[in-house]
Image: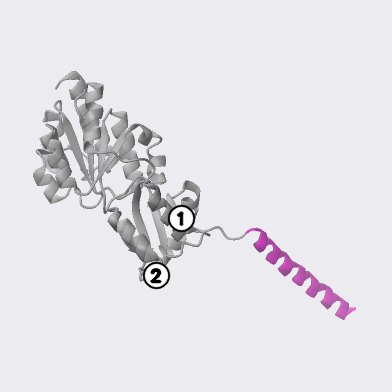
Amino acid sequence: MQNNNKRYENKKRGDRAEGRDRRTERRPLPPPAAAREENTVGNGAVIGRNAVRELLRSGRPVDKLLVQSGEREGALVPLVGEAIAKGIPVVETERRKLDLLAGSVPHQGIIALAAEKEYCTIEDILNIAAERGEKPLIVVADGIADPYNLGAVIRCAEGCGAHGLIIPKRHAAGLSPVVTKASAGAIEHLAVAKVVNIAAAVETLQKAGVWVYAAEAGGQDFRTVDLSAPTAIVLGSEGEGVSELVRKKSDGVVSIPLYGHVNSFNVSCAAAVLLCEAARQQRNGK
């Protein structure tokens, strides 16, 4: 009887262990949060050599090409060469990041990040203002790296009636699905130009009669600045702000007075404050 009881207890323990195994198989551990977000939101990734090759041939806008570190050889060479010839930034990336972007799809050491919409030119943005019979109101994003911030800035810009946004080609967020989601649909109604050099873009705007103001600490109170003329507001990166060269080339520096303990606003908050004032002045006069 004692032996039978032992066998029965062993069987129960075995059944419980087997049950745990079955439950584990039915309910696998969830992937890391970053991976869940990428798979849910979509990341604009075109994955693998053949897919990237067809993307480059299609003429669709491409923000950048991610190539696994140390893999610029063999079948990747012509793809990298074609991307460089088209002016597409090529970034060497750790395999771990490529794996995360690709999910379960074999990436073969290469992933392209395609833009969500067609980019336009600075001239196109100026023409939009002319067609509406309005003074240009333009936002210049000088290195905004966080896609959620860029999306929020786009939403603010469109809501204030801005005619377009200018972003740099390198070292900044492009028009990814995350940006689209953060803009809450506003990206569909705002022209976006992508330029090689923000400082050169500032000069182009100035030649077209647009006054360019850098949003930075230590400048003139924005409420005392005449923003009723054709205006462009330059918003800097999250960490460094507006670059020194762009700040020097701007026609002025505007600041938002702060009365609390923090010394700056999030870039999208600053965009909302400055653009609302510029829109008010352009429509109602200073």
Residue 66: horizontal and vertical position, in percent? 37, 59
Q: Residues within 10 Å of mark 2 (few under 14, many from 20)?
A: few
Tag 2 secondary structure: loop
In the displayed orientation, state which residue is furthest to the top. Answer: 284
**Residue identifier under label 1:** 51
- Give the mark nearer the N terminus: 2 vs 1: 1
Q: Amino acid at mark 1?
A: Ala
Report if residue 160 is visible in the image.
Answer: yes
In which quadrant of the rendered view does residue 192 lie? top left
Q: Residue at x 35, y 50 (%)?
A: 62
Which residue bears the numbered disc 2? 74
**Does residue 274 appear in the picture of this structure?**
no
- The amino acid type, in three-letter code, at marker 2 is Gly
Locate the C terminus and report the quarter of the image it occupies. top left
Residue 197 image position (x, y, % from top left): 19, 48
Could you tell me how many numbered marks the image carries? 2
Numbered range of the magenta stretch: 1-27
